[in-house]
Image (cartoon, helix red, strand yellow):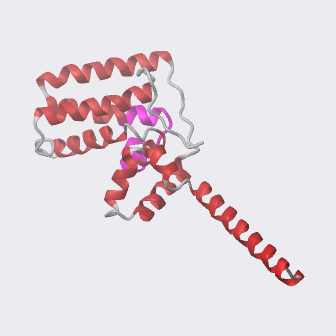
């Protein structure tokens, strides 16, 4: 083999290795694909559906959420705060039997309040709060989304998005999972952070 051919082969191999490293580095930095699926779980699939199946657009959105809210540090709750919020949640559940729509509205308000106290954007900025929660509690954020949607419609004089009592109960159960995550009342945390 000539010296020129050997040099050419070494340059080609070096370029292929550099290209592979750059591709891996970009993929790791963006947390794309599998990492986002694992981190966001069902929220990943919801984002893909919201973008009409365009996974690249969904992943851009999810990566933007991580960049905006990934460094957020939750403020711990004091024991008396946790107890007070837990008592309020118990009251919400008790109200559900007599007035499901009122209980749904109370649950929505309570989740927004607890999230704000923990350091998430204020509940008055629901979309921003939901985006931040999805970064840190992706596996339980859909319960908050459902309860919020029902509370808004019920507050406007509707029948909680045409929802029956069973649908409202299901939304309340889903919202309770996020409540447990936020207050530390659950046995396990639903948080999934990227390493």
Residue at the far front in the pictured view: 1
Residue pictured at 18% horizontal, 35% vertical:
168
Magenta: main secondary structure: helix
Which quadrant holds residue 7? bottom right
- Quadrant location of the N terminus? bottom right
Asked whether residue 125 appears in the rendered view, the answer is no
Residue pictured at 46% horizontal, 54% vertical:
62
Please give left or right for residue 75 compared with residue 146 in the image: right
Please give left or right for residue 89 compared with residue 164 in the image: right
Which quadrant holds residue 2? bottom right
Residue pictured at 66% horizontal, 64% vertical:
20
Residue pictured at 36% horizontal, 19% vertical:
86
Q: Is residue 119 magenta?
A: yes
Question: Range of the magenta residues?
Answer: 112-130
Q: Residue 155 location, x and y as percent?
A: 18, 42
Q: Is residue 110 magenta?
A: no
Asked whether residue 54 appears in the rendered view, the answer is yes
Please give left or right for residue 156 compared with residue 187 in the image: left
Q: Is residue 129 above or below residue 174?
A: below
Most foreground residue, 141 or 119: 141
Q: Residue 75 location, x and y as percent?
A: 54, 31
Q: Is residue 32 above or below residue 119?
A: below
Which quadrant holds residue 99? top left
Q: Residue 98 location, x and y as percent?
A: 11, 23
């Amino acid at each position: 083999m000539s010296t020129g051919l050997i040099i050419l082969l070494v340059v080609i191999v070096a370029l292929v290795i550099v290209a592979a490293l750059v591709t891996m580095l970009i993929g790791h930095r963006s947390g794309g694909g599998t990492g986002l699926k694992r981190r966001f779980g069902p929220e990943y699939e919801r984002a893909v559906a919201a973008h009409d199946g365009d996974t690249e657009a969904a992943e851009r959105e999810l990566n933007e959420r991580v960049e905006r809210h990934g460094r957020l540090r939750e403020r711990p709750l004091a024991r008396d705060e946790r107890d007070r919020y837990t008592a309020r949640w118990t009251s919400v559940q008790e109200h559900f039997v007599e007035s499901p729509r009122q209980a749904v509205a109370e649950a929505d308000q309570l989740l927004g309040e607890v999230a704000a106290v923990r350091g998430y954007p204020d509940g008055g900025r629901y979309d921003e709060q939901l985006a931040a929660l999805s970064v840190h509690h992706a596996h339980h954020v859909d319960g908050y989304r459902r309860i919020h949607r029902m509370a808004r419609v019920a507050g406007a004089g509707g029948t909680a998005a045409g929802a029956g009592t069973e649908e409202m109960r299901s939304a309340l159960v889903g919202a309770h999972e996020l409540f447990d995550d936020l207050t530390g009342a659950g046995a396990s945390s639903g948080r999934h952070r990227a390493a």
